[in-house]
Image (cartoon, grey):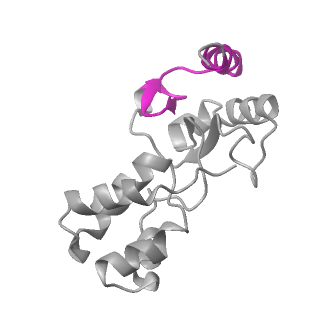
Amino acid sequence: MKAAIDFGELDAILTKYGHKANNIIPILQDTQAKYRYLPREAFPYLSEKLGISTARIYSVATFYENFSLEPKGKYVIKICDGTACHVRKSIPILERLRKELGLSESKATTDDLLFTVETVSCLGACGLAPVLTVNDKVYPAMTPEKASELLAKLKEAN
């Protein structure tokens, strides 16, 4: 289930950045902020409006790790698997979340686009390990049980 592309919204983003090809990164950032990923349907449109190749836009989108070509959930849960978190048992937290959401290593986002679960190398909060974030809000000293409770609260909020 992907969001339909509103080219009027893309035009507003392009206008914000003066329709300049050298602003491709902030243009893609704003596009991703709008859709929670970079819809491939937007690439030919941006290519035409900016006068640069679709291949160049694609290369920028795939070079930077923060861009996603796949839809992400409303709640993006990142589980740290850096050394401190791994030693303090971050993997059972990941496994619990995946099990409860019906996700796997190859399927990171729920069908209803509510949750995305990802692992990251480090969240920079080693003293609080194991750590996860939900949309960049840090949750320290997690356990599988605490992760389940957090998931239940997020589901209730919807």
Farthest left residue in view: 18
In the rendered image, residue 88 lying in the magenta stretch gets the answer: no
Is 136 magenta? The answer is yes
**Residue at horizontal 65%, vertical 31%?**
89
48, above or below 40, in the image: below
Residue drawn at (69%, 35%), measured in percent from left and top? 94
Work out whether 14 lies above or below 95.
below
Near-viewer residue (140 or 16): 16
Range of residues picked out in magenta: 128-155
Is residue 74 depicted above or below 122 in this figure?
A: above
Q: Position of residue 126 (x, y in %)?
A: 43, 33
Q: Could you say where residue 12 lies in the image, as x and y percent from the top left? A: 29, 55
Answer with the quarter of the image where residue 10 lies: bottom left
Where does the image place residue 30, in percent across and percent down from the top left? 34, 53
Q: Nearer the viewer, residue 84 or 44?
A: 44
Count of picture labels = 0
> Residue at 22% across / 61% down in the picture?
15
Does residue 60 sit above or below 119 in this rendering? below
**Which percent across, then down, holds residue 138?**
44, 26
**Between residues 89 and 151, which one lies in front from this camera angle?**
151
Front-most of residues 113 and 76: 113
The image quadrant of residue 144 is top right
Q: Which quarter of the image is occupied by the C terminus?
A: top right
Asked whether, in this view, residue 116 is left or right of residue 64, the answer is right
At 50% from the left and 47% from the top, the residue drawn is 36
